[in-house]
């Protein structure tokens, strides 16, 4: 069975132990539903494309703890140079999951990502200098291998081929404006994360 966003998030959640988790886009929306109060979670909103950079900063600041980033393919393409930045620093505790569903705003507008052919993020990561890269297309395979994924040489990129969710928005159902809280959450979550890591009184 092809992976979907919720299955992938649940598998990662069950295996993460006490890792810091930085999420964005559809993975972030899913984590809001299945694990909204995770003490070591940080959402990359409204910083589209910035999830891996945030995760890198955390990985360098807290080297004794694993850092997992749940990135989107469209988001990563907006800041593709981050692969070279991560690889250049080589954090041994950074695990970079890319939810490759081929669309922007999955489940919303479902706009196509840049380019017309599938993008090989594993090849990009290895060319940039990541220590390892793996791809999964089936939920069962990811479930079987998730423990080894989180112990393989890092920085590691794990590309997940995800089936996109049907779009909700279009000409007959316009997307509503985002509330202010959507743009304030990253700061509030960052303060919570710092308190839980003991770096903020």
Image: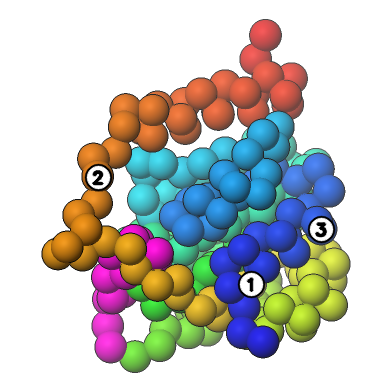
- The image quadrant of residue 144 is bottom right
Q: Dot 3: what SS?
A: helix
Instruction: Where is residue 126? Give x, y as percent.
Output: 57, 78
Q: Residues within 10 Å of mark 1 (few under 14, many from 20)?
A: many
User: As drawn, is 167 to the left or to the right of 121?
Assistant: left
**Residue at left offset 52%, top offset 50%:** 28
**Residue at left offset 67%, top offset 68%:** 7
User: As drawn, is 85 to the left or to the right of 2?
Assistant: left
Instruction: Say which label, 3 or 2, has the lower sequence index.
Output: 3
**Residue at left offset 27%, top offset 61%:** 169
Q: Is residue 10 visible?
A: yes
Instruction: Where is residue 184? Give x, y as percent.
Output: 40, 27
Q: Dot 2: what SS?
A: loop
Decide whether residue 201 is among the magenta residues. no
Res. 158 mark? 1
Are discs 3 and 1 less than 8 Å apart at CB?
no
- The image quadrant of residue 13 is bottom right
Give the residue number, with chain letter if any, for mark 2.
176
Instruction: Say which label, 1 or 2, has the lower sequence index.
Output: 1
Q: Is residue 128 visible?
A: no
Give the residue number, with chain letter if any, for mark 3.
15
Are discs 3 and 2 less than 8 Å apart at CB?
no
* Magenta-drawn segment: 105-116
């Amino acid at each position: 069975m092809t992976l979907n966003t919720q299955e992938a998030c649940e598998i990662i959640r069950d295996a993460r132990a006490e890792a810091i988790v930085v999420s964005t886009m559809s993975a972030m929306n899913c984590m809001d539903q299945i694990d909204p109060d995770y003490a070591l979670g940080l959402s990359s909103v409204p910083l589209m494309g910035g999830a891996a950079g945030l995760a890198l900063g955390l990985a360098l600041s807290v080297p004794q703890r694993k850092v997992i980033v749940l990135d989107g393919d469209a988001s990563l393409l907006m800041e593709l140079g981050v692969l070279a930045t991560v690889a250049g620093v080589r954090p041994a505790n950074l695990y970079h999951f890319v939810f490759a569903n081929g669309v922007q705003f999955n489940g919303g507008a479902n706009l196509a990502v840049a380019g017309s052919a599938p993008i090989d993020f594993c090849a990009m990561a290895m060319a940039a200098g990541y220590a390892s890269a793996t791809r999964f297309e089936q939920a069962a395979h990811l479930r079987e291998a998730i423990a080894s994924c989180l112990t393989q040489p890092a920085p590691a990129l794990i590309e997940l081929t995800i089936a996109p969710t049907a779009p909700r928005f279009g000409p007959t159902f316009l997307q509503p404006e985002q509330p202010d809280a959507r743009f304030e959450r990253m700061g509030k979550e960052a303060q919570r994360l710092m308190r839980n890591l003991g770096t903020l009184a």
